[in-house]
Image (spheres, helix red, strand yellow):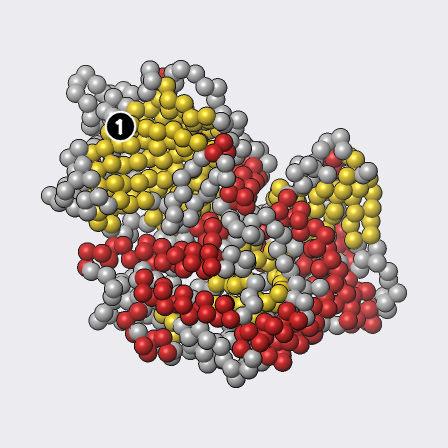
Amino acid sequence: MAIIFHEKGREFHLFNKEVSYLMRIMENGQMEHLYYGRGLRDKEEFGYLHEEMQRSLMAVCMPEPSVLSMQYTRQEYPSYGTGDYRSPAFTIIQENGSRIVNFTYVSHEIFGGKKSLAPLPATYTEKEEEAQTLEITLHDDVIDTDMVLSYTIYEDYPVITRNVRFVHRGGGKIVLDRALSMSMEFMDMDYELVHLAGAWARERYVKTRKLEMGIQAVQNLSGTGSSGEHNPFIALKRPHTTENQGEVYGFSFVYSGNFLAQVEVSPFDMTRVMMGIHPEGFAWELKQGESFQTPETVMVYSNRGLNGMSQAYHRLYRTRLIRGKWRDQARPILLNNWEATYFDFDEEKLLEIAKRAKEAGVELFVLDDGWFGKRNDDYSSLGDWYVNLKKLPGGISGLSAKIEALEMKFGLWVELEMVNEDSDLYRAHPDWIIGAPGRFQSHGRHQYVLDFSRKEVVDCVYEMIARVIRESSISYIKWDMNRYMSEPYSRGAEAGEQGKVMHRYILGVYDLYTRLTEEFPDILFESCASGGARFDPGMLYFAPQTWTSDDTDAGERMKIQYGTSFVYPLVSMGCHVSAVPNHQLQRMTPLETRGNVACFGAFGYELDLNLLSGREMEVVKRQIAFVKKYRELIQIEGDFYRLRSPFEGNDTAWLVVSRDRTQAVAGFYQRLNKTNASWLRLQLQGLEEDMLYEVSCDVTPVSIYDEERAGLDGNGQEKEQVKKYRAYGAELMYAGIPVDRRDLDRKGGDFASLIYTITKCI
Ligand code: GLA
C-alpha cells in the first residue's frame, strides 16, 4: 500500500494490492480524477488519462489556446459556477450573494494511519501501518477559505475513505449551502445502480436499475432515521456482475441523519456519484476561524462480485468501525419480552419468562418498553426515565438482581430521543421538542422528538438514564427511536442557525452515545428504530449491533437479512426467533426455520418459552446449543457468501466460511414447497478445493418435535436423523450439495430449511 505524489505530472496515486485511485492537479489548480478501480502498477506518469477537445457550447476555464473545460472533466470535488452544469458537490454563498468559487491546490500531506473525525463516527486504524492518509489543501483567495480533501487507503482492504473539511480563515461570513462528502466520476454509464430500499417491516430490499442519462438518487429527509426507506448505501455494478464475479463499486455513508446518494449521467455518458449530508434544510454558516467537517464515505472496489464488496465492508466495519469491548466477542443469546408481553407485565410474569429462558440456555434477559413512568401503552411517559414501582416494586435494580441470581445478564429498553405530551418532562419543558412555533405539530406514535440539537436537553436525558444504569446491574441496552422529525425547527436556535439543526440533532445523539458508552464501557448497546429504520454505519460506531427489523417472520427475514448483508456484518444484525402465527403477518413457519434464519446474526428469542410444548423446548435447546457452537464462526471469524437470492426465486441460501477454510455453515431455505419437482444442487463458495470435508445435515422430521403432528400421523416413533458424507471442497463448490426435497418435506414443507455444517476431516 502506498500514496505517492508524482511531481512531474503533479499526480497522486493511492494503491494497494487490489485497488488504485489516481488524480492530478490540473493546469487551473483544481483537482481532476483520472482513475479508480482494479490495482495498477505505479509509474511516473498517467497524464495520458486526461483527455480534452473543443466542443460546441463549451466554457473554457483557461486562457486560449487551452480547451480545458470543467464540463467534460472528471473533477474530484466539483463546485457550482464553472461552466460545468451538472450538480456540484458543494456550494458556498458569500456575503455579496455570489456562489462562484475557485479552490486551487496549495499543498498536501501524506501520513500513516487515519485521523479521528470525532464527534463524528468514522472508520479507524489501530496501527499507523494499517493505512495511509492523503490530505490535499485547496484554497479560495477571494473568501480566504481552505478546503481539505481527505483520502485514506487501507493496506488490507479494497477500501478508500473520503471526507472534506472547510476552514474559513477570511473576515466575512460564508454559508455552506451544500457540503457533500465525496464526488467520483466514471468515464461511461454501463452500470447498474444497486440500493437498499424498503419501509417498516420490509427494510433493505435489494433494488437494481440500469443507469440512464440524468439524475437518479436515493435519499433520506426524516431527520432522525437514516435507513428504513433508503439505506445510506449505493453500489454501481457492471450489468454482468453477479454475487461472485465482476466489478462493483460500493459507497457507504458513515452517518445517521439526512443523506443524499446521487448518480448523474451526463449526455457524454460520464457517471458522477456523490454522497453526503442532504442539502435540503442544510445551511452552515462559518465565521472567521470556524470549520465544518463532513462525515465519511467508505468506498469499496471489488472485482469478485457483490460478495467481494460485502465481505470487504463486513471485515472493515466489524473490526475498524465497531469499537469497544464487544467488537471481537460473539454476542450473548438473549430473550426479549416485547412480543411475549407487550406492555402487559409485572415482575412475577417477567421472572417466569426469564426462568424458562434460563432453562433453555438463554444468557441475557431483556426488558423492553413499558417499565418507566406510568407507561401501559404508547400514549405516555417517554421522557420520564424512572421505574414504574407498581409493575416492578423492587425497581430495575431489584429486577436485575433477581435476573442475575438466575445466572443471566440483564438488559433494558430505552427511547431517549423522544417525549410524550403526557409526561413530566414535557410538562416541565414544552419548548424542548422539535417543531415550528405557530405551526401544527405532527405527532407520531403519540410522541414528539426531543430537540437533541440543544445541549441542555441531552444533558438532562443523560442524567436521568445514567442514574438508572448506575443504580442497577445492566449489561445491555436497546436504544430505540420510533418517529421521524416532521417539522424541523429548533426553538433553541437563532434564525440564521436553523440550517444547522438537523445535523446538530444527530451530533446530539452521537454525544449522548459517547457519554453513555464512555461511562458504561461494558454495556452491549443495540440500536433500533421501529425495527431497522436506523441501520447505518454511524450507529455501528457507537452500538455494535442493530435490531434488524420488527418483522420477525422467518420468510420475510430471509429478504431483510439478505439485503442488510450487502453492507453490514452478520454480528451487527439482531435476529430473533418469535412466536407463530407471526405477529406481523400471521404466517406459520417451522420453529426450526425461524432458528435457522436467526442464527445468521446476533441470535435471540422474542417470545414466552413457557407457551411452547416440551418437544418444542427440545428444538429451542438444540438451537441454542448450535448457536453456542457456531457463533464464533458465524459472527466473528467467518466470511459470508450469499448463494441464492430470495428476491429472485423460491429459495434462499447463504454460507459462512472460516478464514482458514476449515469450517463452514450453510443455510438453505425455501418459501413454498413443491411436489414432484426438479433436482436441486447447492454450489458452495470459498472452500479449499483440495481439502476433504465432512458434510453433515440434520434431517430429523419436524413431526417428532410437533406433538399434534406426531399424534395425527402416527409418526411419533421417528428418530433424530443426521446425513453425513465426505467430499472435497472442489466437489462442494462445483458439483454442489444435492438438496434432497424429501428432507424439505420432512422439515415441514412450506418455509422448510436445512443447515449444512462442513468441517475439515482430520
Ligand atoms: C419499536 C421496536 C420494537 C419494540 C417497540 C416497543 O417498535 O422496534 O422492537 O421495542 O418499539 O415499543
Taking 445 as reference, is 490 left or right? left
Total numbered labels: 1
Residue 196 x/y as whole percent: 48, 49
274, above or below 512, in the image: above
Return the residue at label 1: 105
Residue ID at (29%, 45%): 292
Q: Nearer the viewer, residue 702 or 96?
A: 96
Q: Label 1's element? A: strand
- Quick one: which residue is furthest to the bottom in this view? 390
Residue ID at (54%, 59%): 523
Taking 276 as reference, is 632 left or right? right
What's under tag 1, amino acid-wise?
Tyr
Q: Quadrant of the C terminus?
A: top right
Residue ID at (49%, 77%): 387
Question: Could you say which quadrant of the image residue 360 lies in?
Answer: bottom right
Dot 1 alpha-carbon crowd within 10 angstroms: few under 14, some 14 to 19, many 20 or more: many
Taking 263 as reference, is 696 left or right? right
23, above or below 92, in the image: above
Question: Could you say which quadrant of the image residue 50 lies in?
Answer: top left
235, above or below 516, in the image: above
Taking 707 as reference, is 470 left or right? left
115, above or below 541, in the image: above
